[in-house]
Amino acid sequence: MATTLIAEIHQAQTRLPFLSRAERGALIVRILRELKILRREVLGSVPADRCAWIDKLIASVSSTVSEIVTMPDAEFNRVLNEFEKLMATLHNISHPQKPSKTVH
């Protein structure tokens, strides 16, 4: 799911000047939903005190969606870039690549 969302973020970045506030808002809400899923599935076994950063991020973004949606294009693009990096990192943690077998 995260890889699909990352592709949607890329698509939104290319269409950024043409995105409506509703489209921006829908994207941020999808990002939040995915962050909550990744928090539960990837970091669910990690002690809560070590996950305060993502809990604070989710709460902060949830409470400021309307402000994020109205950001100028350049700032909104930076927000999308950071979410993309975070999603990719959490996805990589949840789906570690299998080490390649070395043939001797």
Image (cartoon, helix red, strand yellow):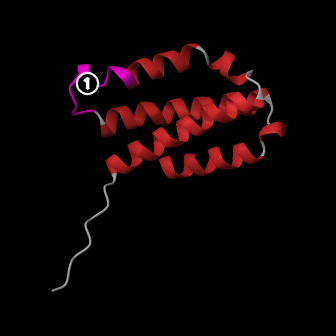
**Label tally:** 1
**Percent x, y of residue 68:** 66, 21
The image shows residue 68, relative to residue 36, as above or below, that is: above
Vertical order, 70 against 26 (above or below): above
Write down the quadrant of residue 77 in the picture. top right
Does residue 2 appear to the left or right of 19 in the view shown?
Answer: left
Quadrant for residue 56, please give it.
Answer: top left
Q: Magenta stretch containing residue 17, yes or no?
A: no
Residue for badge 1: 50
Q: Seen from this angle, which residue lies furthest right?
A: 18
| Vertical placement of residue 49 versus 45, above or below | above
Q: x%, y% of residue 43?
A: 29, 34
* Vertical relation: 33 (above or below) 8: above
Residue 83 in the figure: left or right of residue 41: right
> Is 52 on the left-hand or right-hand side of 87?
left
Whether residue 95 can be seen here: yes
Q: Is residue 64 left or right of residue 99?
A: right
Q: Position of residue 94 (x, y in %)?
A: 33, 48
Q: Can you give x and y, in whole percent of width and height, for residue 45 in the image?
A: 21, 34
Per the rendered image, the range of residues in magenta is 44-53
Residue at 24 percent of width and 19 percent of height: 49
Q: Secondary structure at mark 1?
A: helix
The local crowd at label 1, few if under 14, some if 14 to 19, many if 20 or more residues have their Cα within 10 Å, is few
- The quarter of the picture where the C terminus appears is bottom left
Identify which residue, 42 or 72, lies in the foreground.
Answer: 72
Residue 1 visible in this rendered orientation of the protein: no
Q: Is residue 46 magenta?
A: yes
- Residue at horizontal 70%, vertical 24%? 69
Amino acid type indicated by mark 1: Arg
At x 50% / y 32%, what residue is drawn?
A: 33
Residue sitting at x 56%, y 46%: 5
